[in-house]
Image (cartoon, helix red, strand yellow):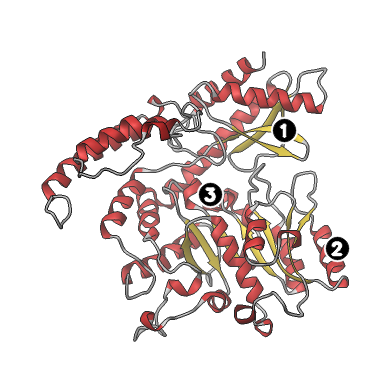
Amino acid sequence: MTEFGDIAPAEFNARAHELVEWITRYLEDPAKYPVLPPLVPGATTALLAPSPPREPEPLKNIFEDFESQILPGITHWNHPGFLAYFANTASAPGVLAEFLMAALNVNGMLWRTGPAATELEQMVTDWMRQLLGLSPGWFGMINDLASTSTLYALAAAREADPSLDIRRKGLAGRDLPTFRVYCSEHAHSSVDKAAMTLGIGSDNVVRIPADEAFRMRPDALAAAIAADRIAGHRPIAVVATVGTTSMTSVDPVSAIADVCEREALWLHVDGAYGGVAGAVPELRHLLDGVDRADSFVVNPHKWLFTPMDCSVMLTRRPDVLKRAFSLVAAYLETAEQDTVINYMDYGFQLGRRFRALKLWMVIKAFGSDGIATRIRHHCELATTFAGWIAKEANWELSAPHPFSTVCFRHTPAGLDLAATNRHNAAILDRVNSSGDIFISHTMLGSTYVLRVAIGNLRTELPHLSRALSLLQAATV
């Protein structure tokens, strides 16, 4: 290293080869680590130096510190026993793409600052559209998370009526009706957070009752909209979900689209988890009605083997999205700006990572048939696991499982609901303390249930069998 320059190329090359070897061994067998670290708050902090080093440290030493100070506190999402939340995978092509992304260090805010990045993003988001069986006519962009994509969709819904002049005058201190947004009682909390951020307010997110299969009821939606109009409110958007976070239920998007078209409301569909199931021909019906939405989000970093973070937002109304966010400062003006896509115009972030590269590499590496085969396999594993649970004494399934997530609970005789909830919470803690398996939980109304979510490329039947054994042992 020179006084004013980067690490010497020879040193980088040597350490990079060592790092690739380490990553190769790690991805080959992540199960050699406990899926959950010892959950002791402050344990990592205690190992870290409280102040930055004054003198440079060799990369070899830094990596040794990574292994001794950082790695012991890692929850291993690549572990085949990771069955919590929505399991995911940092696949090999995605990891390699992250190397290239970091090396190129592209900021794709303008077409000019990343021509290939911009054009690849346009193409690969259309690949996603084709992969999921949606019709032509969608504009695509890649954000970090579905929470951002949902916020953008509601910002566009707020801007859909230009006569309101929201982007210039805002909402406060004006004679405007209260805006209302509608979603299922089981929709993701990002809808509420988006409403809070956009000045709509969480009190104006109307949670619509669900049916016995946990799906939003279109009749209740229509009634809520009618009641709000009578009360003088201004309905602006509905958020439907394909694969809700707790139990992966699928809202009846076609019937909801009927309501939205009749009421002239923006329809956003959250398919962050379940949307990728459209890659499997026999599951594509779960996306029925999505083609009638104004916007749709799916997260390849959940179930499409793409490393965090990568959220694809599709919209049929990019002009409204651009009107909500476009602001071109003088130093960002370019000669070609009227003939190209400048992604900075479609969101509040100026800088943008080259996320399209990793999605492109993942789709090319697995192919549409390979992707469908893997997703189908995960759904089959979930069906097998659900069958095991259904046959176990005093265990019951708590919800349908249209994808690869199973909700269930243990119901010993003689316990009321509160005691049963505590009993299942204790089961979860015992299973997770094993280091072999990590599961999560949710609440279905007032009922505490356990969740097993299958989405990791390395999860197979033996891991699910181990989970079942731990669950059985944890009941005593």
Q: Secondary structure at mark 1?
A: strand
> Relative to 343, is 26 above or below?
above
Inspect the image, locate mark 3, and give the three-letter code of the amino acid beneath it: Val
> Relative to 330, is 139 above or below?
above
| For residue 110, side relative to residue 395 (left or right) | left
- Kindly report which numbered mark, 1 or 2, lies closer to the viewer in this rendering: 1
x, y percentage for residue 327? Answer: 48, 79
Residue 154 position by quadrant = bottom right
* Closest to the observer, 138 or 229: 229
Inspect the image, locate mark 1, and give the three-letter code of the amino acid beneath it: Tyr
Inspect the image, locate mark 2, and give the three-letter code of the amino acid beneath it: Ala
> Relative to 427, is 54 above or below?
below
Find residue 448 and name its label: 1
Q: CA distance from mark 1 to mark 3?
A: 31 Å
Q: Residue at x 25, y 38 (%)?
A: 62
Q: What residue is pinned by disc 3?
A: 280
- Kindly report which numbered mark, 1 or 3, lies closer to the viewer in this rendering: 1
Q: Residue 28: in sight, yes or no?
A: no
Q: Secondary structure at mark 3?
A: loop
- The answer to the question of whether label 1 and label 3 lie on touching residues, with beta carbons closer than 8 A, is no
Q: What residue is pinned by disc 2?
A: 223
